[in-house]
Image (cartoon, helix red, strand yellow):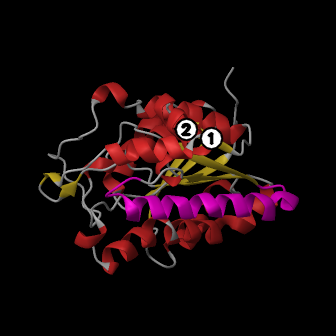
């Protein structure tokens, strides 16, 4: 039976597409009220209208997690609309990929600005609210936060960082009654692999991950929201993701040999390198 969140006020960053949009639909299905935050407000507007037609209270908030002050404005708008914030999902992110020799310090800075400092901005802007509501903080990590592979150092570094952050915050915030849940997806249907190293979405780009291994965003969202509602420590999403994390934890030598046997070969379309989740 689904864990309900009736009346909970939920703020989701990166809610305009992919996992973020699927999370919004799943939270709505479980009775939550939603603050949808992203840069692409036209997409947010269409999503909010869809949810409102089904009876969900949903607001649109333009915000970029890389801009100082945007998350404070998003939090204030959420309080104004709903009076409180019960759940925060730090979902916004993208992936910079490529061999270290082909990347620059600016590439790494750009990756961390969104995937790490963007998460921190979101937390700082909402932490007092979560303490008041004894609420839930969810950080969207990745299987790549457990297992680093060639040509993925910026992305893996950022996801290792937020995994460490979630572990620290889980203990720091326990006394305040705030639950911290790390979500570590494997390959999921999303736009992540269609975004280039500068964060630009390419609609015509090809997803290089074969369809048979990709979990639907809706299925990922169901598992994610259940983990958040039940205040779980972490949820590794997708069967292959669970298998990879298990082998990395318990048989790291074997995983190292397996990774050594795999190779990546350059870009698969203009402006985009092959990417792992």
Q: Position of residue 73 (x, y in %)?
A: 54, 71
In the foreground, 214 or 119: 214
Q: Name the image quarter holding residue 40.
A: bottom left
Which element carries disc 1, helix, strand or loop?
helix
Looking at this rendering, what residue extends furthest in the right direction?
Answer: 175
In the foreground, 118 or 154: 154
Q: Is residue 17 magenta?
A: no
Marks 2/1 in contact by CB < 8 Å: the verdict is yes
Left or right: 198 in relation to 123: left
Query: What is the spatial separation of the Cα atoms under label 2 and label 1, in whole angstroms?
Result: 5 Å
Residue at the spot x=73%, y=37% of the render? 230
Q: Main secondary structure of the magenta part?
A: helix
4 in relation to 119, above or below: above
110 in relation to 230, above or below: below
The residue indicated by pointer 2 is 247
Answer whether residue 270 is visible to the viewer in this image: yes
Q: How many marks?
A: 2
In the foreground, 39 or 104: 104
Residue 250 has which mark? 1
Which element carries disc 2, helix, strand or loop?
helix
In the foreground, 143 or 100: 100
> Quick one: label 1, few (<14), some, or many (20+) residues within 10 Å?
few
Residue at the spot x=88%, y=60% of the render? 175
Answer whether residue 55 is visible to the viewer in this image: no
Q: Position of residue 176 (x, y in %)?
A: 85, 61
Left or right: 3 in relation to 122: right
Q: Position of residue 141 (x, y in %)?
A: 53, 52
Left or right: 114 in relation to 121: left
Q: Which residues are magenta?
A: 149-178
């Amino acid at each position: 039976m689904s864990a309900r969140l009736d009346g909970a006020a939920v703020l989701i960053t990166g809610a305009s597409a992919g996992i973020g949009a699927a999370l919004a639909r799943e939270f709505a299905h479980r009775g939550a009220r939603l603050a949808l935050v992203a840069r692409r407000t036209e997409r947010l507007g269409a999503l909010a209208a869809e949810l409102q037609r089904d009876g969900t209270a949903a607001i649109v908030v333009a915000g970029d997690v890389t801009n100082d002050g945007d998350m404070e404005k998003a939090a204030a708008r959420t309080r104004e609309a709903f009076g409180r914030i019960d759940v925060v999902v730090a979902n916004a992110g993208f992936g910079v990929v490529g061999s270290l020799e082909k990347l620059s310090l600016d590439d790494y800075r750009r990756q961390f600005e969104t995937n790490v400092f963007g998460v921190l901005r979101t937390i700082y802007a909402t932490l007092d609210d979560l303490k008041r509501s004894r609420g839930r903080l969810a950080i969207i990590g990745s299987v790549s936060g457990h297992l680093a592979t060639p040509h993925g150092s910026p992305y893996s570094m950022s996801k290792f960082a937020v995994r460490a952050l979630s572990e620290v915050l889980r203990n720091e915030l326990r006394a305040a009654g705030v639950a911290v849940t790390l979500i570590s997806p494997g390959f999921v249907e999303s736009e992540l692999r269609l975004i280039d190293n500068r964060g630009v979405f390419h609609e015509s780009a090809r997803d290089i991950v074969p369809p048979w291994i990709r979990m639907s965003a809706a299925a990922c969202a169901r598992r994610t929201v259940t983990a958040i509602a039940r205040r779980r420590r972490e949820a590794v999403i997708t069967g292959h993701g669970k298998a990879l994390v298990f082998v990395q934890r318990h048989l790291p030598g074997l995983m190292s040999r397996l990774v050594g046997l795999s190779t990546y070969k350059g870009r698969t379309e203009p402006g985009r390198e092959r990417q792992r989740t």
